[in-house]
Image (spheres, rainbow, N blue to C red):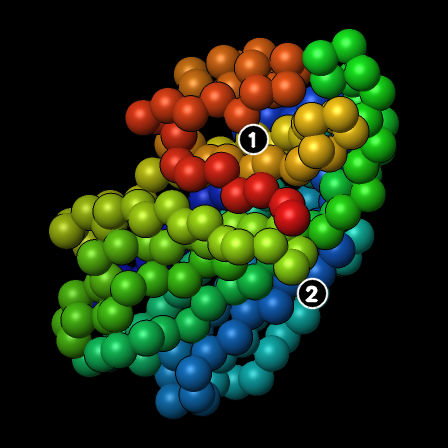
């Protein structure tokens, strides 16, 4: 029988002066036949959607600082039985605000973004092949990080870390968000971000930018 599929999310890096707040979390399942979706934050609590309803023990409006865990999502098949097709997902809404300095210029930020955790199709008695972490700014195109799910029952996809950045007004006042499974890439991405550059590297997934 397939086991749970857990995905750990971290706020890897954030420019000084900016504040990242999770404002809402919504787990959802395709139906009540046994699918499950859950989100847990070590300080704010948890929220779920499953055959029994939508138990909500999450305190909303919690801040996450650089290096801290945003939370862990848990997707489950139909009560651990034969499961096929698309399962549940978890949508995380966040707010980024504050004042920072980029390339020697002051930048003001006050915007919303989203992180959605889902998976490829469940395969009967096996878990999905991929954990999909999609991220985007409000009213802007999404980007996706596809993380391989180990074939072993106990194995989980790699933890994912997010880096958020911004460009000043004279560069188009653009917000950027990227992700990585390589912790050592976070500081380099931030070093470039301070200079107003969204660093592109094989260790990073694509940048999601604002319109």
Q: Position of residue 119 (x, y in %)?
A: 34, 62
User: Which element type, helix, strand or loop, lies under badge 1?
Assistant: strand
Q: Which quarter of the rendered picture does the N terminus lie within?
A: bottom left
Q: Earlier in the sequence, mark 1 or mark 2?
A: 2
Would you name the residue on which mark 2 appears?
Answer: 57
Q: Nearer the viewer, residue 25 or 101?
A: 101
Count of residue discs: 2
Please tell me which residue is depicted at 28% across the width and 64% down the height of the picture: 120
Quadrant of the image occupied by residue 101: top right
- 179 up-or-down from 134: above or below: above
Q: Nearer the viewer, residue 194 or 27?
A: 194
Q: Position of residue 190 (x, y in %)?
A: 58, 18
Q: Nearer the viewer, residue 139 or 164?
A: 139
Please tell me which residue is depicted at 60% across the width and 54% down the height of the picture: 140
Please tell me which residue is depicted at 49% across the width and 13% down the height of the picture: 188
Would you name the residue on which mark 1 appears?
Answer: 163
Q: CA distance from mark 1 to mark 2?
A: 28 Å
Q: Is residue 193 left or right of residue 202?
A: right
- 28 up-or-down from 168: above or below: below
Front tag of 1 and 2 = 1
Disc 1 packing (10 Å; few <14; some 14–19; many ≥20): many
Please indicate, yes or no, whether residue 79 appears anywhere in the rendered image. Answer: no
């Amino acid at each position: 029988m397939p086991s749970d599929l857990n995905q750990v999310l971290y706020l890897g890096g954030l420019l000084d002066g900016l504040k990242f707040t999770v404002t809402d979390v919504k787990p959802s399942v395709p139906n009540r036949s046994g699918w499950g979706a859950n989100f847990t934050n070590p300080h704010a609590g948890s929220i779920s959607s499953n055959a029994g309803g939508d138990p909500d023990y999450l305190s909303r409006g919690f801040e996450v600082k650089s290096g801290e865990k945003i939370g862990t999502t848990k997707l489950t098949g139909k009560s651990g039985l034969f499961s096929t097709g698309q399962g549940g997902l978890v949508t995380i809404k966040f707010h980024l605000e504050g004042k920072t300095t980029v390339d020697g210029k002051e930048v003001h930020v006050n915007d919303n973004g989203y992180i959605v955790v889902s998976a490829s199709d469940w395969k009967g008695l096996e878990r999905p092949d991929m954990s999909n972490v999609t991220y985007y700014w409000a009213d802007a195109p999404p980007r996706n990080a596809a993380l391989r799910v180990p074939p072993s029952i106990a194995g989980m996809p790699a933890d994912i870390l997010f880096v958020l950045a911004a460009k000043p007004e004279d560069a188009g006042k653009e917000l950027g968000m990227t992700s990585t499974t390589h912790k050592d890439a976070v500081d380099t991405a931030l070093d470039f971000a301070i200079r107003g550059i969204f660093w592109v590297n094989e260790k990073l997934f694509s940048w999601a930018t604002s319109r």
